[in-house]
Image: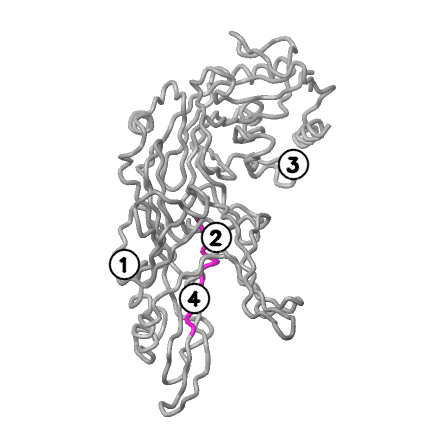
Amino acid sequence: MNIFKYRLKLLVLNFVPMTFLLLSCENDITSIGSNFIPDKPEGNVAYVDLVAYNVFNNDTIRADYATLTNGLVGVYEDNVFGKSKASFNMQVRLSSSSEILGNIQEVDSVILTLNPGYQSSLPTVKQVILNPGSSSGIDTIKYITQYPLLSYIGSKGSTTKMKVKVNRILTFLESSTSRFYSDKVIDVGDLLGTAVLGDSVTSINIKTSEGTTVLESTAAGYRIKLDAAYFKQHFFNKKGSSDISDNSRFIQYFKGIRISPDEDASKFMFSFPKSGITLTAYYRYKDDASSSTYTNATYAFTMNSVYNSAAGEYDFYERNTASSQFKQQMQNPNVTSGEKRLFLQGMGGPSIHLKLDDARIEAVRDSVQNKGWAIIDAKLKFYLAEDAVSKPDYIYGYNLTEKSFLPDLTGYPRLTGYYFNPRYDVTSNPGYYTLNVTQHIKNVVEKNSSNDEILVEMGNFTLNSLGTNYLGYYRTSRAYEPFRLIFYGNQETGDKKLRLEIIYTKK
């Protein structure tokens, strides 16, 4: 019944006249045969063949402020795609709301915080008694809550650890309008700190055993301790210097930081929003050297404004550990007949190029115009040929010929239950990803629009800050998606081959 309502909404939206719906579950698959499209209403599903092959992107992708909503860090290797390594570079700017206080400062700590997305429904809580209330009976308890990461690829478990390092960079990142690509070489300067990260993030909360809050919960994330003495020497001691007098001078002086894995052995990759990065110095100050009293203060550098330029940096190690099939298809794809397997990867990895068969599209057009067909649904199903260690929530596609959105992305924004690229569902359809292209196909066969080529990539389109409009067909999460997928292609002989599925009614 839900399927009926869903398809009926599409019919009403597109003003398609109908007398009845053929929604028989007993005859759900139609064999098209040599004439492509059946003349008799033997079923309500037809298929259109296509040609699909991989596009090798030379392992580079635009990865700057305009394209990076998130940063990506880590190193990961498998025996199909090979090894890749990701680092993230970002400008550091002066605080927007405070200055260095006092004439004398002592820096206690400097903390860099990353806040990756995590699975809030899967917490693991550990309790540590800090102050047993032996006389009062009221204990002080530290609650340590861990959450598994969301955008993560690699093995998981308590033994999965990766050392990361934070360096000062020596390359000027220019402005937030500058174009950088993922193979840009960033010169690395002094080491500022290191940390060993796991596959989960931690939040800390301290309460008494009677429920009184002593310390509010900190946001779940990674906290990397940097060299306090270094910031004392290179920042606080420069109070009054022209180097830190304003941002135009400061970003030329300090330039920024680089977060990168400290090893090449395969561990994991994780992404994190730029908006969640903080860099805070905790210090004490006084005005008179003879005074023994210090006042506590913090200095929060600006890390996530519209002016902080950023650059993603990816190294694919020349794919020397990738499979022979992967290498062959990247170097010499079969653009005429397509492939039996298709590879899809985030970062600068391969995309999938597809073109629907013109003759079969013409047969569908003839059936719509002369045989009473009414198309109510059309979709591309990408069946997984191999199970992946971690899977992304989305894949996406766009009109490669016109360099534009497909109409299904923007045509049904208010239609409940209809999504151009629905979120991957591990329960009801764990074996495939879907792109709904109903309006695109209707335009082609009903309005004689061009049978344009489609490019499919890893990730999802980016919305504006209000979540109301897409920023552009080229503004996506692809640059910081760590995932890898293998699909059946159009040369697969079974029912999982890649093809267009059309659901129709017949008057």
Mark number for residue 171? 1
Q: Which residue is mark 3?
A: 417
Q: Earlier in the sequence, mark 2 or mark 4?
A: 2
Q: Is residue 263 left or right of residue 95?
A: left
Q: CA–CA distance between discs 4 and 1?
A: 19 Å
Q: Residues within 10 Å of mark 1 (few under 14, many from 20)?
A: some
Residue pictured at 52% horizontal, 39% vertical: 393
Q: CA–CA distance between discs 2 and 4?
A: 19 Å
Element under label 4?
Answer: loop
Per the rendered image, the range of residues in magenta is: 271-282
Mark number for residue 247? none
Question: Picture coordinates of residue 249 (x, y %)?
Answer: 31, 70
Q: Is residue 140 above or below residue 445?
A: below
Q: CA–CA distance between discs 3 and 2?
A: 29 Å
Q: Which residue is mark 2?
A: 116
Element under label 1?
Answer: loop
